[in-house]
Amino acid sequence: MTEAHMPNWLSLGLVYLAAAVIAVPLARFLGLGSIIGYLGAGIVIGPFGLNLVSDAQAMLHFAEFGVVLMLFLVGLELEPRRLWAMRRPIFGWGSVQLFGSTLLMFGVGVLAGAPWRLALVAALGLAMSSTAIGLAVLAERNLGNTTAGQGVLSVALLQDIAAIPILALVPLLAAGGGLHDDGGPPLWVEAARALGVIAVIVLGGRLLLRPALRWIARSETPEIFTAAALLLVVATAALMLSVGLSMALGAFLAGVLLAESEYRRELETDLEPFKGLLLGLFFIAVGMGIDFNVVMRHPGLIVALVFGFVLLKTIVLWGMARAMPVPLAERPEFVILLAQGGEFGFVVFQTATQGRVIDGEAASVLVAVVTVSMLLTPLLLLATDRWWAAHLRAHRVEPTEHRLDAPQDAPVILAGFGRYGQILARLLFSTGVRVTVLDHDAEQVEAARQFGWRVYYGDATRLDLLRVAGAASAKVLVVAIDDVEQNLALVDLAREHFPQLTIVARARDAPHWTQLHQRGVRWIERETLDAALMSGRSVLQQLGVEPYRARRLALHFRRHSIEQLVTMAPHLGDRARLISISKAGRQQLEQLLAQERDLAQRTRGRLQDGARDDGAPG
């Protein structure tokens, strides 16, 4: 019998997926984050680890494919309207970061004695931050809507845009300074060919892309539509490669062209499940690409370069953070996510090597420097979480404006002026009820004051502040704080020192509702319950249920949901008992709603019979 051999693609897929499945959950369990897991998996299976993947050429192609796919997804998200809305922070602060960091590093490199072409290429490559790591961390930490998150996104978008002229500029540096002359066509001819190909891709894509996608969409075959998108990526990348430009640049252009079409949403829906995995595979490739031979040959140089360029970029970024301004507690994330090197650096150094602007050894050192900085980024974020951010929060200077200094006598105290507290406050103020509003977010207080709301800055969990707010004489304390721990801490404090207060609390979810109920709070509202029930009523009405009956069904469900939580509260630690109560409650609810349906049908039948009797001839 002939021995069966596993195909190379199957063995490689097995190794990559197994490494990811093992390393990422382990890294998350240790509190290191998924990116460290991917990078660590790449190091372990790479040539300098277990050598499960030893073909350096295959590893290089794999890394390039990861970059190509990642840049396609980045381009797909770069919608022109979104770009226009963010034009000032993108082209303003993004340009400050890119050109400021480049000029600073270029100047230091030239002063250190490096050839100016090498210094400029290194500065251009190291000035670019990792879009993949930055966006992944923002999503993982839910920082996208923070000031720091918006700043990181703006700078990343500018870098994505600037990659196009930078990659076109690098080959021009070889004029009169290349390492060799191979007798090829003049440089201006190659540049003209590159610009011509870019123009053909952009103009042809605008004229032909939408009709082609419309024709493909008429086939009503989703996999063919996705295949067409991938064909566009591959074809564009191959076309760019044919004129000496990066495949990644072609993939980025393909993504931008699709972002401008009316089929972008469908493409995003098809590709979104693969996005996280593709980025993860890219990080594995980055880990595999660390050339430890280069690191061991030049350990001092690499450490100095990593420390030096990160320090120089930190100087620029910290100045930007103060001027933008980014809140003090958010500045560490803003600086760290942009101070690292990025995947565009790989492309810049590869292009410079192919164009014979720098030699292979210098490119290897620079690639190692970028890779080490990317590997250190998640570790620096962990250190920031455990020390720096906590230190800044503990020692931050609280604003003196809008603080509550004079004693208040309003009958209602509202703690928390977020989206929930604002709605409640507007209702109370509009009905003439006097309310003392407290919030611990200085920016939120300042914004509310600009819109005419009298909101005071302060931590409602401080006993002295509650006394000044009039808790001893107030009738109602509304706890609308989003953070569950602070929410419960305020309830405990109020029940201990101001027992006459009626507490009306906002619960984030069912477990939070149970904790409040156990503390004796009886006026509790779950923040998403009524909104979800209103949506449910709308769905029922669209399905033909009468509006009054849809309202009755929603009220039945609401009453049953609260009663079930009360029943489950004494058994919070007994999982088996909670599951039993939940199943029994679901059966009771189904029976209740079935009885409601039967009653409605009988009522409708009697009304129809009565109508026929009234219409019968006498």
Image (tube, rainbow, N blue to C red):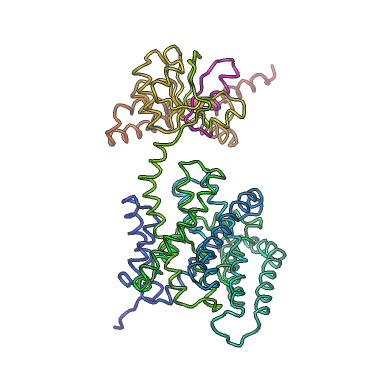
Question: 303 or 145, which lies in front?
Answer: 303
Q: Residue at x 64, y 22 (%)?
A: 611
Q: Quadrant of residue 586?
A: top left
Question: 426 or 449, which lies in front?
Answer: 449
Q: What span is colored magenta in the figure?
A: 422-443
Q: Residue at x 56, y 77 (%)?
A: 355
How many numbered dots are placed on residues in this image? 0
Q: Is residue 81 magenta?
A: no
**Residue 274 placed where, x, y %?**
48, 59
Q: Is residue 265 visible?
A: yes
Q: Is residue 244 above or below residue 78?
A: below
Describe residue 229's horizontal placement relative to residue 361 as left or right.
Answer: right
Question: 146 or 216, which lies in front?
Answer: 146
Q: Is residue 438 magenta?
A: yes
Describe residue 242's horizontal placement relative to residue 339 as left or right.
Answer: right
Q: Is residue 135 visible?
A: no
Quarter placement of the C terminus: top right
* Furthest residue in direction bottom, as rendered: 183
**Residue 69 placed where, x, y %?**
52, 64
Q: Is residue 585 above or below residue 210?
A: above
Question: 534 or 147, which lies in front?
Answer: 147
